[in-house]
Amino acid sequence: MTRCKWCNLKNPKYIEYHDEEWGRTNFEEKYLYEMLILESFQAGLSWECVLNKREDFRKAFDNFDIDKICNYDDKKVEELLKNEKIIRNRLKINATINNSKIFKEIQKEYGKFYNYLKTFTNDIILYETDKTTNWLSDKISKDLQKKKMKFVGSTIIYSYLQAIGIIYSHEKECFMHKNKKSQE
């Protein structure tokens, strides 16, 4: 079975993520939140690195309980910085706490984070490959930065939109490939 070129066929977690999760629409609030946090940890690293640590991130960050993360204090930050099973970057950990508070503010304003995303997407799915940014990731990134989120540059947001299924990017050779025409 042919998969996207980026999928490391020697890594069962990566294969499972590629085949079962990446590019599939999933707009559940908890998933949207988890993926935004994980994608922010990817900045400067590979997604495979983050994915390999995903379960450890879940444990370290209270199963991505947004209310708990919003209340993390300096003691919890120090605990996370000592956890060798996750990416120990003070700026990213502090950004996670900050971004969680902003995520909640967005949920409060729009009812759901997905409703916020829809103000940019108009409920469309984009089908494109071989890109790392586009007009949509630029707009969302710029707005999130305006709201004071960190580690949400256009490349990170593009990757996030691919992960949650707003941008569908399985390569033409991949068994998962489909395009807008095949969906009509």
Image (cartoon, rainbow, N blue to C red):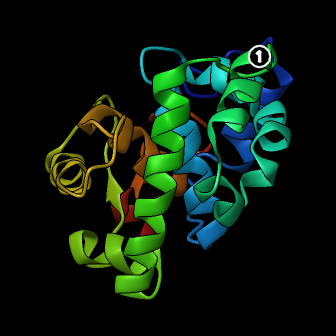
Instruction: Using a 10 Å C-alpha cutoff, classify the residue at mark 1 as few (fewer than 14 neighbours), some (14 to 19) or many (20 or more).
Output: few
- What x and y, as percent, mark residue 99? 44, 51
Towards the viewer: 167 or 170? 167
Q: Residue furthest bottom?
A: 111
Q: Residue at x 38, y 81 (%)?
A: 115
- What x and y, as percent, mark residue 72? 65, 48
Q: Is residue 22 left or right of residue 125?
A: right
**Residue 94 appearing in the image:** yes
Q: Work out whether 139 lies above or below 46.
A: below
Residue type highlighted by circle 1: Lys
- What x and y, as percent, mark residue 100? 51, 56
**Residue 2 appearing in the image:** no
Q: Work out whether 116 lies above or below 15.
A: below
Q: Is residue 112 left or right of residue 58?
A: left
Q: Work out whether 89 lies above or below 61.
A: above
Towards the viewer: 146 or 128? 146
| Quadrant the C terminus occupies | bottom left
Q: Is residue 78 left or right of residue 11?
A: left
Indicate the quadrant where residue 14 lies: top right
Q: Residue at x 64, y 44 (%)?
A: 73
Q: Residue at x 53, y 22 (%)?
A: 90
Towards the viewer: 55 or 167? 55
Q: Work out whether 108 lies above or below 126.
A: below
Q: How many numbered marks appear?
A: 1
- Residue beneath disc 1: 82
SS at badge 1:
helix
Q: Is residue 81 left or right of residue 37?
A: right
- What x and y, as percent, mark residue 80? 72, 27
Q: Residue at x 80, y 20 (%)?
A: 83
| Quadrant the N terminus occupies | top right
